[in-house]
Structure formats: structure tokens, C-alpha cells
Image: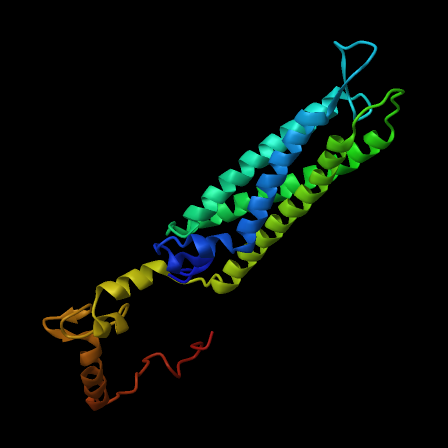
């Protein structure tokens, strides 16, 4: 198979080395994304909401009072953590996958997921920063955890962006290792199933024991004898009884 080494399939089945695994740049990006996702979720849980002094039963989101923004940031922190852990598990099992199509699907899913989270976190960083700067609250409040959440959003976007870039590089490297080469699979399978002397004569003739043989003698073996026999036959010019008669040419 031409693409035997595509996506590292030729090295599948090896023992898992956790030291080498933890030093991979992709794994480091995954771990960073998981930690930042957990930190983002915890920051919003700890200080994303402010309890008003006038009405102690009322909580207000510190992103300009937008409760939707606070809920969305908390949810994205949780989903980022879960997605990073799932991709870490896939990276740990990747070397044990021998099917090239399965490896290709894993790499494409990695690219799509990482690019999606990177894009979402960039938009979320811009949105949360603008809403926090527009916040007007006429009573003291603690905004340290909200600022940490904004910082975690930016760092998470960088971590997911790095993971998406590394997944794209893996895809490009696999395509360079296994270029597509068209070939006739049926002819290859036929030639692998028969001897070399028979395969060379496939289609016309063959050897005395294989394809194209008749009564123990192949067509290719008979061809020189037939040519010699035809040369020995005297060539008699063909005569036309109508040649020379009037109107023959019309």
C-alpha cells in the first residue's frame, strides 16, 4: 500500500511511553487548554456574579449585567475542559490505531475542534473585555476573578490555536509522506497471485504452463514457427480476369 506510513500508521502498535507523550507539543497544548478551561469555569463560579448591597437576594453579572455572558463563559470553560481531556485520550490511543482512515478522521476532528474553540475564545475575549470596561456599578465590588476569566479566555484561545496549527501540520506531513499514486488494483492483485513468467505474458500468450498455452505450447512459442512457415510459401500474384476490359475502371 502506498500510504502505509500515512499518519504514522507504520509505527502503530508500540508501547506507550508517558514521558515521550507528555513532551509532545500537541499534548502540552491540550494540557494548557484543560487547565485554562478549568480556571475559567472556577473564576466565573468564584467571582463572576456580584451580590448587590441594596438587594442581597439579587445577583448581577459583572460583564455589564449580562447574565447570558456569564453563563456562556462558564459553559465554555466547562466544555473546553471536557474537549481537551477527550482529545488527550485520543492522543494517548493514537499510536495504537493501525487503520489509516481512522487516523485521518481523528486528525480532521482534531483540527476542526481545536479551530472551533480557538475562534470562540477569541470572540469571547473581545466580548467580555468590552462589557467589563463598560460596567458601571456605584458600589464596591471585587473584579479580580472577572479579570482572571478574561485573561484565561485569551490564553485558552492561544492554546487551542496552537493545537489547531499542530494538527494541521500533522495533516500536511502525512499528505507529503503518502502522495496519491493511481494504479490498477486488479492488475496488481492478478500479478501477485501468479508466477512472474505468466504475469509477463498476461493478455497475449504466456508460458507453456500458464495463460495462453494450448496443448503445452504457448502462442508466443508458436509465433516464430508460423512466421517461418509463411515465408516458405511462394507468393503468387493475384490475377483479375476482368483487368484490361473496356469499362473496367468504371
- Taking depth in this image into account, of 232 and 240 the one nearest to the observer is 232
Quarter holding residue 228: bottom left
Q: Position of residue 34 (x, y in %)?
A: 58, 40
13 displayed left or right of 107:
left
- Taking depth in this image into account, of 74 and 186 the one nearest to the observer is 74
Up-down relation of residue 211 to residue 140 (above or below)? below
Q: Position of residue 220 (x, y in %)?
A: 22, 78
Q: Report whether residue 105 is seen.
A: no
155 displayed left or right of 202:
right
Render colour scheme: rainbow
Quarter holding residue 208: bottom left
Q: Report whether residue 235 is seen.
A: yes
Q: Position of residue 247 (x, y in %)?
A: 45, 76
In which quadrant of the rendered image does the N terminus lie?
Answer: bottom left
Residue displayed at 46% across by 57% down: 20
Q: Position of residue 224 (x, y in %)?
A: 21, 84
Residue displayed at 40% across by 55% down: 17
Up-down relation of residue 157 to residue 209 (above or below)? above
Residue displayed at 39% across by 81% down: 245
- Taking depth in this image into account, of 83 and 142 the one nearest to the observer is 142
- Taking depth in this image into account, of 75 and 18 the one nearest to the observer is 18
161 displayed left or right of 108:
right
Amino acid at each position: 500500500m502506498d500510504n502505509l506510513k500515512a499518519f504514522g500508521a507504520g509505527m502503530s502498535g508500540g508501547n506507550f511511553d508517558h514521558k515521550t507523550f507528555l513532551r509532545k507539543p500537541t499534548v502540552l497544548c491540550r494540557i494548557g487548554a484543560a487547565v485554562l478551561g478549568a480556571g475559567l469555569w472556577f473564576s466565573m463560579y468564584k467571582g463572576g456574579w456580584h451580590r448587590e448591597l441594596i438587594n442581597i437576594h439579587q445577583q448581577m453579572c459583572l460583564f455589564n449585567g449580562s447574565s447570558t455572558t456569564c453563563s456562556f463563559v462558564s459553559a465554555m470553560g466547562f466544555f473546553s475542559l471536557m474537549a481537551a481531556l477527550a482529545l488527550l485520550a485520543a492522543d494517548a490511543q493514537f499510536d495504537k490505531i493501525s487503520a489509516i482512515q481512522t487516523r485521518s478522521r481523528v486528525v480532521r476532528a482534531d483540527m476542526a475542534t481545536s479551530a472551533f474553540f480557538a475562534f470562540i475564545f477569541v470572540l469571547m475575549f473581545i466580548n467580555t473585555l468590552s462589557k467589563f470596561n463598560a460596567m458601571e456599578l456605584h458600589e464596591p465590588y471585587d473584579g479580580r476573578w472577572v479579570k482572571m476569566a478574561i485573561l484565561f479566555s485569551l490564553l485558552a484561545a492561544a492554546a487551542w490555536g496552537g493545537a489547531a496549527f499542530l494538527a494541521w501540520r500533522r495533516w500536511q506531513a502525512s499528505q507529503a509522506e503518502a502522495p496519491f499514486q493511481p494504479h490498477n488494483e486488479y492488475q496488481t492483485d492478478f500479478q501477485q497471485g501468479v508466477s512472474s513468467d505468466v504475469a509477463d505474458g498476461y493478455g497475449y500468450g504466456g508460458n507453456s504452463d500458464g495463460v495462453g498455452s494450448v496443448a503445452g505450447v504457448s502462442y508466443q512459442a508458436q509465433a516464430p514457427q508460423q512466421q517461418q512457415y509463411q515465408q516458405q510459401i511462394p507468393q503468387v500474384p493475384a490475377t483479375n480476369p476482368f483487368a484490361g476490359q473496356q469499362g473496367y475502371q468504371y
